[in-house]
Image (cartoon, rainbow, N blue to C red):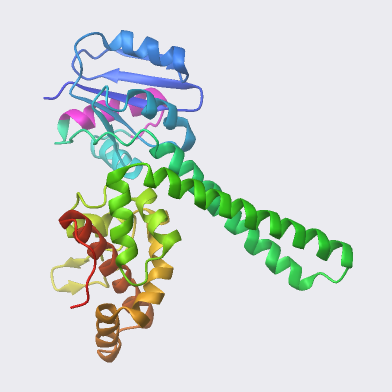
Amino acid sequence: MKDSIGIDISKDQLDVHRSQTGASAQFPNNPAGFRALKSWIGNSSPDLLVYEPTGPYHARFEKTFAGRLPLVKVNPLQARRFAQAQGTRAKTDAVDARMLARMGSALDLLPDAPAAEDQSDLKELQIARIALIKDQTRLKNRLKTQTLAITQCQTKARLAQIKRHLTALQSEMESRIKACPKRTRSYTILRSIPGIGQVAATAILIACPEIGALGKKQVACLAGLAPMTRQSGTWRGKAFIQGGRKNLRDALYMPALVAFRYNPDMKDKYRTMINAGKPAKLALTAIMRKLIELANTLIKDDREWKPK
């Protein structure tokens, strides 16, 4: 059995449980608490530190211990299902920490590869950009119904400000990406694929830093674009996509719309599916999957796109 430590992360505190000794503790979720946690762990490094993503609350913890301890970030739904399979119905921070430690010991989990130092900064920039896009859409819709000169003037001024902020954010993200030679090469490869532009290439690299190190099925599942088969006996259910990273899937939508028109390989695939009677939405989802699989393969092989 692996020596696994489960950590339930909330806004103010960390609840910790170590499977090997059965010891539990609680620390504040701040730099002082991180130092106390490191002292509690001691010199004998555990095999795994298992935790769930909790929005902004796990970011500081992850940034502090990434590369220093074997961190494993697990899907909250899978962790809950594991606890239920253990017969545990109660849900408290202490119980969750114990279940996470038991999950790390029982399952063949592997430590996550350490993220780049500025990965969290890039993600923050991308989240800010998404928020500005939503604001821009809302203001454009409001402008269509406004009749007073003063409200129109104010809305147009805010739209101009958002446009400047979007340009600044995109420039900052690209400069950070190009500061790393490996990411610069991946960015160049992505831009060589017809349909993937400047904004989409940046969004893909931020939403999927593992691209190029995964298999075809892995990257499709990560994007939530792999259909889930449902069968039992003679019953055959309808397959559908679910889960995955929404930001990555959103980043592939517009490139797919462009690709099935101007990328010859994707155009042939789309026409084949439509001629076979497949719905247009299903065919577009297939193009999104082929795009991320193609991007993953090209980055893995370190080669740019060329038409067949």
Image location of residue 232, percent across then percent down: 17, 66
Residue shown at 88% from the left, 68% from the top: 148
- Asked if 147 appears above or below 22 in the picture, the reply is below
Residue shown at 44% from the left, 46% from the top: 175
Residue shown at 39% from the left, 20% from the top: 15
Residue stretch in magenta: 89-105
* Viewer-closest of 274 and 137: 137
Image location of residue 199, percent across then percent down: 45, 59
The answer, for residue 209, to whether it is visible in the render is: no
Image location of residue 179, percent across then percent down: 37, 42
Looking at the rendered image, the quarter that the C terminus falls into is: bottom left
The picture quadrant where one finds residue 84 is top left
The picture quadrant where one finds residue 26 is top left
Looking at the rendered image, the quarter that the N terminus falls into is: top left
The picture quadrant where one finds residue 259 is bottom left
- Asked if 96 appears above or below 275 in the picture, the reply is above
* Viewer-closest of 138 and 190: 190
Left or right of 44 in this view: 166: right
Q: Characterize the magenta stretch by its predominant secondary structure.
A: helix
Residue shown at 24% from the left, 79% from the top: 265
Image location of residue 46, percent across then percent down: 20, 19
Indicate whether residue 101 is drawn in magenta: yes
